[in-house]
Amino acid sequence: MAVGSAFLVVWCLLMVLSLLGYGSSAGGWCRAGAVILHATAVALVLRPAVKWEGWASRLLIGVGVVLILQMTLYHGLNLLTRGFVGVLPVSGVSETALVRNNDTVLYTGGWTRPDRPGARGNLVVCRLERGYGIDRVIGLPGEHIAVKGGQVYINGLPVPDGVEPLCGASQFPDFAFEVEPGHVAVLPSNLHWTAQGENAQRLLIQLLNRNSHIRESDVLGVAVWRLRPFGRFGAME
């Protein structure tokens, strides 16, 4: 009884640590430890039935228990978690008070994703040409988006309050595009570049157009919670 209670306490601790470390290597190691501990407990229960088996057979049985637990119970828990939330380790962004490098952000998963995650003003996680980004949706299908002199305009009018890109637009060159059906517009804060000369400027604007004009299917979800660092733990406002 005492051994079983100790196993349960340690297993619960590992699972809590794996949840707190969700999306990190430390969280993965804690989850692996929980699987191995669970398998060890099962092996102890089965020990009387396999005590006459050779060491190789017992080893294979132990490995089999680990694999079965991993592929059924724990894999199922992982899929269940992903259905509710996705995780984005933030890196390479121009930092703001809301989003900083090394933040770990949770966003709505497949089951909790709003019908229109790309609604104007939503802080969304989206798939870019290379990697992933987090920023506000500023434009909707059919609208004309323009950046002029570091200001954003929608159909010729300044972008409304609360819809501004996270990092503003002062770092962007002048460019414009139409938001096509099935797309939304963002100004991603994790694009970094250097451009010199007319040809380089043209290539830069092409890069911005491709990564500011996002398919709605590439809007993965709405950012809802900052998981880490723990000093910034809380809702994404």
Image (tube, grey):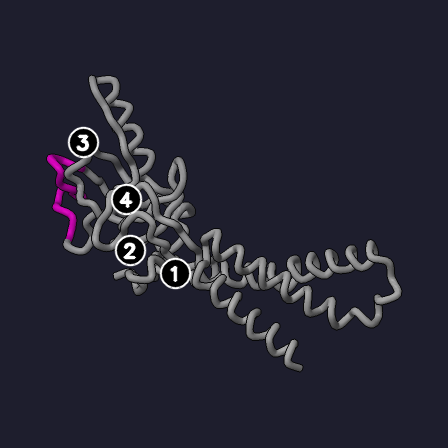
Amino acid at circle 1: Pro
| Mark earlier in primary sequence (3, 1) | 1
Looking at the image, residue 88 sits to the left or right of residue 232; the answer is right
Q: Amino acid at mark 4?
A: Val
Q: Residue at x 29, y 55 (%)?
A: 122
Q: Which corner quadrant holds the N terminus?
A: bottom right
Q: Give how far apart the Cα atoms at labels 2 and 4 are.
A: 10 Å
Q: Which mark is first along the chain, 3 or 4? A: 3
Identify whether 138 is placed above or below 67.
above
User: Mark 2 sits on what residue?
Assistant: 122
User: What secondary structure is found at the residue carrying circle 1?
Assistant: loop
Question: CB atoms at circles 2 and 4 under 8 Å apart?
Answer: no
**In the image, what residue type sits under mark 3?**
Pro
Residue assigned mark 4: 186
The residue closer to the viewer here, 229 or 144, is 229
Mark toward the start of the polypeptide (1 vs 2): 1
Q: Earlier in the sequence, mark 3 or mark 2?
A: 2
Q: Secondary structure at mark 4?
A: loop
Mark 1–mark 2 CB contact (< 8 Å): yes
C-alpha separation, residue under disc 3 versus residue under disc 2: 24 Å
Q: Which residues are magenta?
A: 147-160
Work out whether residue 8 or residue 163 is closer to the camera in this orientation and state it. 8
Q: Of helix, strand and loop, which one carries label 2?
A: loop
**Which element type, helix, strand or loop, lies under badge 3?**
loop
Disc 1/disc 2 C-alpha distance (Å): 11 Å
Amino acid at the residue labelled 2: Asn
Q: Pointer 1: what residue?
A: 114
Q: Earlier in the sequence, mark 4 or mark 1?
A: 1
Residue 113: x, y in percent?
Answer: 41, 59
